[in-house]
Amino acid sequence: MFKKTLLAVGLSLFAAASMAATEGTDYVKLEKPMVNAEGKLTKIFSYDCPFCFKYDVGVDPKVLPRIEKETGLAFNPIHLETKGKYGRIGSEFLAMCLLRDKAAGVSVESKDSLFKKAKDAVYVAYHKKGERWTSGEAAFLKTMTDATGISADEFAKAKNDPAVKAMCDEWKLSYDVAKIQGIPAYVVNGKYLIMTKSIRSLDGMVELVKELKDMKQALPLRLRGAGPDRFSLGGRDGGSSVSLVFRLRISSPRHPTFSHLTGSEKGKGLCRNLFRPSTKGFFHHDQIHEGARV
């Protein structure tokens, strides 16, 4: 009876693990976490990025409310000043608006948001009306001041505010993240960059964010050697112990092949999702307590 229960628990773990997001395909773990991004879904964007505009119109309104409700992650928009002729002043104005929204307790997705009004006005002008503000920076600024009711003189003073400068300086650090796969770039908890090319549906994006948000809460597992090419994987699922055995064959240091004793694809998926080879010949994962040298 115990063996049957253990097998059932084991198969349950197999099914859950085989559905896990794959690092390098669905997401990338950042080598250096973003500043002040824990507990947030960060979006790095630029006013002159057509893909950012498409996501802003067709994706964000449908997924952000769900993500906030289902994960508790706060939306954290970051404008990239290095892209676009008026990227710098765009960042300064949007940072000012974002800080005012926060002070007033207004969501950046609310119709009353100064950030949203400024962003939407520039987006529409650039991507729908073909505006390029050829007469200069003042024309670009006017698009945002007209949309928000904030005068150019008021902005000239506000952009020198220490809080605005600090936010813009912090936003500059996002360039290192943006260059990994381009923008828009969505980052969960400041650690996990979503590979947008892997997203196949709105539901899929929400589920991926949920999984990455809970990444650190994954089931703790322990890897032990059980023979020349056999390893056991153990942990706890609730109050029950779990012990699974699989085979490992190394064709090259960076390309191991795994197989469950039954040869099941779920077993292979479990191993691929949980382990990745390091350059030193060890397998490592955030939740693994012991590694096996190969």
Image: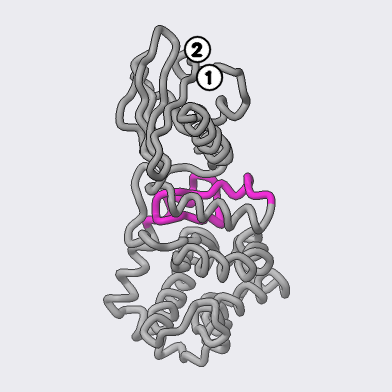
**Figure check: 28 above or below 97:** above
Find the residue positioned furthest to the left: 162
Residue placed most toward the observer, 138 or 26 = 26
Q: Which mark is residue 249?
A: 2
Residue at the spot 35% in from the left edge and 50% down from the top edge? 33
In percent of width and height, residue 210 lies at 51, 55
Q: Which mark is residue 101?
A: none
Observer-nearest residue: 223 or 79?
Answer: 223
**Residue 50 left/right relative to 102:** right
136 lies above or below 274 = below
Residue 57 is left or right of residue 218, and the answer is right
Badge 2 crowding class, 10 Å Cα cut-off, few under 14, some 14 to 19, many 20 or more, is: some
- Residue furthest top in the image: 228
User: Where in the figure is residue 152, as x and y percent of width and height?
Assistant: 45, 88
Taking the spot 51% from the left edge, 92% from the top edge, the residue there is 149
Most foreground residue, 281 or 3: 3
Q: Secondary structure at mark 2?
A: strand
- Residue 258 - label: 1
Task: Tell whether label 2 touches label 1 (CB within 8 Å).
Answer: yes
Q: Does the image show residue 27?
A: yes
Which range of residues does the magenta coloring cover? Answer: 173-200
User: Where in the figure is residue 181, as x and y percent of width and height?
Assistant: 54, 46
Q: Amino acid at mark 2?
A: Arg
Rendered image coloring scheme: one colour
